[in-house]
Image: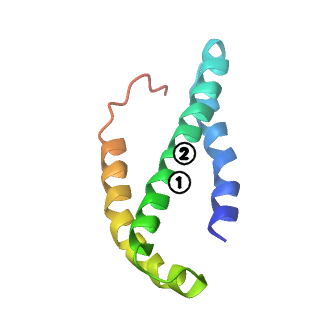
Amino acid sequence: MLGAGFGLLMQNLVVVAQNAASPADLAATTSAVVSVRGLGLSLGVALFASLLARELQGRDPGPRATAAAIPDVLFWGAPAAAVLVVLLALLPRTGRRA
């Protein structure tokens, strides 16, 4: 469900960035959005996978142990995501068109 929601949202974000860019910068804007999105997804998967691996240490492998570790992963991952959102909000905004 979460993947489907993000999948439906991601293309809209590319269109928003393209609409905010000048025609001369359209290709650079599109490639920057796609590159940053790929980098963010890679870092997010690595972060949450390492948190999950840490929580699964010492537990019996299996679906029940994984399901029991997910709330702990979200407990540690949510503050990290919140910090990233705050940092994103603090980025300077330039080049706004009327």
Residue appearing at x 37%, y 30% in the figure? 93
Residue 3's x, y, as percent? Answer: 66, 62
Task: Give the residue furthest to the top.
Answer: 24
Residue appearing at x 60%, y 83% in the figure? 63
Determine whether the residue tagged by mark 2 lies in a helix, strand or loop.
helix
Instruction: Name the kind of residue labelled 1 in the image.
Output: Val
Label drawn at residue 42: 2
Q: Nearer the viewer, residue 76 or 95?
A: 76
Residue appearing at x 46%, y 67% in the figure? 52
- In the displayed structure, does residue 23 sit left or right of residue 36? right
Q: Nearer the viewer, residue 24 or 11?
A: 11
Residue 94's x, y, as percent? Answer: 39, 24
Contact, CB < 8 Å: mark 2 with mark 1?
yes
28 vs 75: above or below: above
Determine whether the residue tagged by mark 1 lies in a helix, strand or loop.
helix
Instruction: Name the kind of residue labelled 2 in the image.
Output: Ser
Residue 47's x, y, as percent? Answer: 44, 54
Q: Quadrant of the N terminus?
A: bottom right
- In the displayed structure, does residue 11 sit left or right of residue 95? right
Q: CA distance from mark 2 to mark 1?
A: 5 Å
Question: Can you identify the residue that label 1 sits on?
Answer: 45
Q: Give the image's coloring scheme.
A: rainbow
Which picture quadrant has residue 50? bottom left
64 vs 7: above or below: below
Q: Nearer the viewer, residue 73 or 7?
A: 73
34 vs 41: above or below: above
Residue appearing at x 58%, y 24% in the figure? 21
Q: Count residues near mark 2 (Cα–Cα under 10 Å), then give few for <14, some for 14-19, many for 20+.
A: few
31 vs 51: above or below: above
